């Protein structure tokens, strides 16, 4: 296993352990328009950042499961609505330098668009331009830089999933 895969597996293992132990935050809102069960579709990813759609989708599943474990179903046929989305943008830019040509810190910015769709195709809820950012350290080693960037993306995905759930359930 490569370092990136090990880190991703470890991150998701910890997230699922938190869910399994019954860890809960106060206040769980209701889904709109009487929706009780949703299916979360893997987000579309037209960006050059491969695999990011799985990270964000998994974080959405973790957040919805953590907030109300009976709300997520395993197939669209069982759902009252489907949560669909797209990775609208991923950008990385230098925010701090050691020297003019050498970065010390970079920042990744991730933007997603989500919508909750009824079986007939009617959009029940939508959120465009959900965005977050996270800084990460840069070193001389490419492998370490990729790992740091992936950790930053995972942190962003978690925060975006929390925000999406909160907006969807008007629980903020």
Image: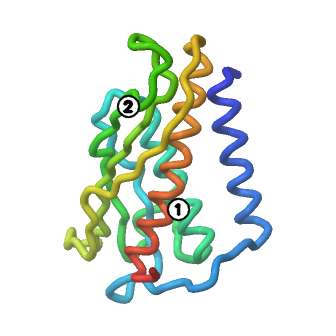
**Would residue 115 appear left or right of 43 to someone viewing this image?**
left
Place of residue 75 in the rendered image (x, y in percent of width and height, measured from the top left) = 47, 62
- Give residue 27's quadrant in the image: bottom right
Q: Is residue 7 above or below residue 26?
A: above
x 32%, y 87%: residue: 33
Place of residue 36 in the rendered image (x, y in percent of width and height, measured from the top left) = 46, 82
- Give residue 69's quadrant in the image: bottom right
x 44%, y 65%: residue: 39
Place of residue 42 in the rendered image (x, y in percent of width and height, measured from the top left) = 41, 49
Along the line of sight, the residue nearer the viewer: 88 or 148:
148
Distance between mark 2 and mark 1 Cα atoms: 34 Å
Along the line of sight, the residue nearer the viewer: 134 or 71:
134
Q: Where does label 2 land, which residue? A: 92
Along the line of sight, the residue nearer the viewer: 106 or 96:
96
Secondary structure beneath label 2: strand
Between disc 2 and disc 1, the foreground one is 2
Secondary structure beneath label 1: loop
Which of the two discs, 2 and 1, labels the residue nearer the N terminus?
Answer: 1
Along the line of sight, the residue nearer the viewer: 145 or 80:
145
Residue count near mark 1 (Cα–Cα under 10 Å), binned few <14, some 14–19, many ≥20 = few
x 39%, y 13%: residue: 100
Place of residue 99 in the rendered image (x, y in percent of width and height, measured from the top left) = 45, 13
Q: Where does label 1 land, which residue? A: 74
Q: How many numbered dots are placed on residues in this image?
A: 2
x 58%, y 30%: residue: 148
Residue count near mark 2 (Cα–Cα under 10 Å), binned few <14, some 14–19, many ≥20 = some
Quadrant holding the C terminus: bottom left
Q: Residue furthest right?
A: 21
């Amino acid at each position: 296993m490569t370092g990136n895969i090990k880190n991703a597996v470890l991150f998701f293992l910890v997230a699922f352990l938190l869910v399994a132990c019954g860890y809960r935050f106060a206040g769980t809102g209701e889904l709109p328009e009487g929706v009780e069960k949703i299916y979360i579709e893997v987000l579309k990813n037209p960006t050059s950042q491969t695999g990011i759609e799985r990270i964000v989708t998994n974080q959405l599943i973790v957040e919805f499961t953590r907030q109300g474990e009976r709300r997520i179903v395993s197939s669209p046929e069982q759902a009252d609505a489907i949560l669909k989305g797209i990775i609208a943008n991923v950008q990385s830019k230098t925010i701090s330098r050691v020297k003019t040509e050498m970065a010390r810190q970079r920042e990744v910015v991730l933007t997603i668009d989500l919508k909750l769709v009824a079986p007939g195709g009617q959009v029940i809820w939508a959120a465009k331009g959900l965005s977050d950012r996270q800084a990460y350290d840069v070193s001389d080693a490419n492998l370490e830089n990729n790992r740091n960037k992936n950790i930053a993306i995972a942190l962003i995905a978690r925060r975006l999933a929390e925000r999406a759930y909160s907006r969807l359930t008007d629980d903020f």
